[in-house]
Amino acid sequence: MIRFFAIHPTAANLLMLVLILLGLNSLSDLKRETFPDFSINAIKATVVYPGATPESIESALCIPMEDAVDGLSNIDEVSCEATEGLATLTVEMLEGGDFSKLMSEVKNEIDGINTFPEDAESPFITEANRTDEVIDLAIHGKNMSVTELKEYSEEVKRKLKQEPGISLIDIKGFSTHQLQVDVSLPLLRQVGLSINDLSDALSNQNIEAPSGELKNENRALLIRIDQQQVTADKLGQTVISASEAGGQILLSDIATITDKFELDEDKIWQDGERIALLKINKNKSQDAIDIASTVREFVVKEQAVSPAGISLVLSNDQSINILDRLYMLLENGWQGILLAFFVMWLFFTWRYAFWVAMGLPVSFLGALWLMSMLGISVNMISMVAMLIAIGLLMDDAIVIAENIASQVAANQDINDGVVKGVSMVFPGVLSSFLTTLAIFGGMAFISGTIGQVLRDIPIVLILTLTVSLVEAFLILPSHLAHALHKTPKADVKSNLINRFKEGFINAFEGFRNNQLVTIVEAIIRFRYLFVGGLVGMLFISVSLMVSGTLAFKAFPNTEADILVARIIMPPGTALQQTEKVVNHVVDAANRIEANLPASGEQKLIEHIRVEFNKNADAFITGAHVATVQVEFLTVAKRKPSIYEIETAWETEIGELPGVVALSIKEPSNGPAGLAIDIQLQGNDMQQMMEAGNRILSEINQYQGVSNVILDVRPGKQELELKLKPGALSLGVNAATLSNQIGTAFNGVKIDDIQRGSEQLEIELKLSKQDTLSQSQLEQYPIRLSDGSEIPLSALVEFNYERGFSRINRVNGLRTLSVIGDVDNQVLNTNVLLARLSNGILKKIEKDYPNIRVNLEGENKEGNETSGSIVDKFLMGLVGIFIILSFQFRSYIEPVIVMMAIPLALIGSLWGHFFMGYDMTMPSMIGYVSLAGIVVNDSILLVDYIKRNVAAGVSAHIAAVNASKARFRAVFITSATTIAGLVPLMFETSTQAQIMQPMVVSIIFGMVTSTCLILFLLPSLYVILDDFGLVKKPSPSH
């Protein structure tokens, strides 16, 4: 087949054309995103229990649901969060489990629970899908009421969902829309009704229901009762009771009906105005750039026809970041390819170099086609994989190209020389491909959330290398033959470029034939000292990490364009007090611009958004929490860094008395999770709070830590009612009491009604004037079974208590976490956690034997993924040994090749040290990629030594000749790999920060591995020959 494609006039070009067309055609099918999608594989079950405390939620809902799913297979973790009025159970599945089966089992078990309280709503069970934010649309309506703003936002949402590709839209800034019926207790008693009577009357009157059908020969009529009222005025006309004399009591006679939203604190302000916020998201099959483009076009059209006073403002556009990062990688990729071509041109004619370099875009397009078939997106990770592939692809192409050139020079016929040149290196190149496959094949299955993000690198590399193997054997030989036919016998004229090239080649050949040989001979002469020195250097390099001089963290930091200030006030704080603190924080943000100029005349701050009733750090909602989000000018356009802005904002805010917690940070923690996440588990919450506060105090003594808080805090004060001994004799039990008190003070939902495109609730409860004090509660009339009434205080005793704002349970135990952030420019997270583990955490375990301490967040995710990488890497090394042992027919010679792998770590570690980077997960992936390149070059060098030894040359001379003969190929491979990645390493844009540790691993490791291959491997071969461990192969082998 190689001969057929090499000499056929069109076959190679047609195959290349097919790969190019398939790749170009697949571009429209490839989705674009910042990072690969990573599935959560979790199931959520939520149960609403209105008015219940976290302790009641825990006992009545969480524990029964935990017991129900206990024993199901393939479950990794079960957690349940109990907050006021809500239980949320999360069931996380082990990797590799059957999600559909688990979903069905969890649903069946929870639906089968029959012990839930009567007032609890039915469980809502769903897949915990991860959706990515794409863009936000803020609707400003200066002259609109809140109700009108909500109605208009629903209309915009309906229109947007009709646009292609847009399906996930959430409207934020409003709580449940209600027709709220606030009944006066004195008026209610005056007409002889209880609040439960009123609830029944409203439920019976306000209905819409089908009631049958009339049929005859000519027509059919559906019968429908429609007594449902959808406005406050009409609902007020509902007849509550009527006398025989014709008198009527209307609802409006005893109650005030208000069209309003349930919670005053559920609102969003942006740039000083109340807004409706439409958050447009995407699922894993959608393209963020297409969605954002569609939304921008829609806004232009909608703004033109919107009523006066309405403005539509876009913000938080994630597609800009995606495009910036992809363009940055494309630019660096093309620069890398051009540099690689330049390196090739130095050694070959421009036609020869062109066709070798042409294999890169052909292989990339073929890989893009395979990516679209497998559902892999174009993202930062997959594109960096293609940059890494430049060196691996050039390695195979250079080996083939160089051998073809030497064979053509020794043969009269170009076609025969091409075929012979390819055939000779076919076993070695195939073996190199298989060893690379062994390395990256295991990496495609690394575990953990970080692993799910990084596994695109090995997968894309495998796809690219597979296509490149086809290109190298079936397409490249034909093109090189064509280039050789077209190559002139001699240059017609000498110009500056030719003189430069000739001078470079002469210098290169002079170094190879003289200095290189001298160096290799000297190293082989002192081979034991050299190898011992390298081993010592390896130990010194590893000690950089062991000592903490070179720190490790799971994921590198990236600079953002958004900061959030998350505010927590004491539970029960009035909304007005929270608003005062929010206004102070917003004013502080506005003052930043005076001290930190952005760039030119552009404003540093683009938008300031305030969301009340929201705080991701608080894990609860309420009038006492709020989040201020500030969107700044993009990184590329502003001068100050996000760290300078954060510091300036904190300084402007200053001390805020009465605030429980104020944290300023970037809004997302990324796939690695929280930097500090220390989990305490037990059953005694008071003990856990005490232990948590001790840990918190210890952490706050370190410089570089910030926003350290406990995720559980004391809750609102509770008034506990207990029945007096004589209550049961009056026919009053706990259920009767709960029903009457709950309806009056917590309210009861009468009905859901549809008004236009919006759904409203009708809610009934006592008016605020009747629920202001404890005395009013004590005097509240409880109706007995005979119709008489008795004050509540005659039936119950009152006790004050204070519980917790939330109770979180993980795997059946109450759980409290100490969470916080770490500035890695000041303090390394792993160093901090190591010190805490050896200090305060050991004391906590000793002082509180019933409390279990776990490290979660970044530490857990990092350990899981790094352990998986090491495990898969070791499996890959075993695969390499098997392949090389089969190829070399030896157990010893594969060890020579593989010795270069651990020693290549020297360059990677020192590269991070000198460049000022921490070791990260991407660094580890970079080192693994480097191992594939090192092995490929090492195989061909050892193979050359074996061929010479088989021909009767001594091991010493064969080793020197091998370094000399393979120097050009090793140099070109290293130079093209470095050239392909060096633009990214020196990229100044912050978009490249996340990938630069990976690039540092490869580039610095490549520099040292080049020396290792040329100097270490020959020395090792001769050492093994000294001990008689290398058998002389027969020439036929």
Image: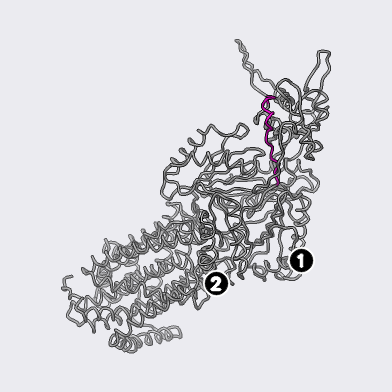
- Chain part drawn in magenta: 717-731
Q: Secondary structure at mark 2?
A: loop
Which badge, 2 or 1, is on the more N-terminal residue? 1
What is the basis of the colouring in this image? Answer: one colour
Depth check: give the residue in front, 245 or 321: 245
Q: Which mark is residue 591?
A: 1
* Residue 766 location (% of width, % of height): 77, 34
- Using the rendered image of the protein, determine whether residue 334 is visible from the camera's viewpoint: no
Which amino acid type is marked by label 2? Glu
In the displayed structure image, the side of residue 765 where residue 491 appears, left or right: left
Q: Which residue is mark 2?
A: 987
* Residue 979 location (% of width, % of height): 45, 74
Which amino acid type is marked by label 1? Arg
Depth check: give the residue in front, 487 or 451: 451
Indicate whether 998 appears above or below 239: below
The quarter of the picture where residue 566 lies is bottom right
User: Is residue 721 on the magenta stretch?
Assistant: yes
The quarter of the picture where residue 472 lies is bottom left
User: Is residue 220 on the magenta stretch?
Assistant: no
Q: CA distance from mark 2 to mark 1?
A: 32 Å
* Residue 945 location (% of width, % of height): 24, 77
* Residue 430 location (% of width, % of height): 29, 65
Q: Are marks 2 and 1 in contact (CB under 8 Å)?
A: no
Q: How many marks?
A: 2
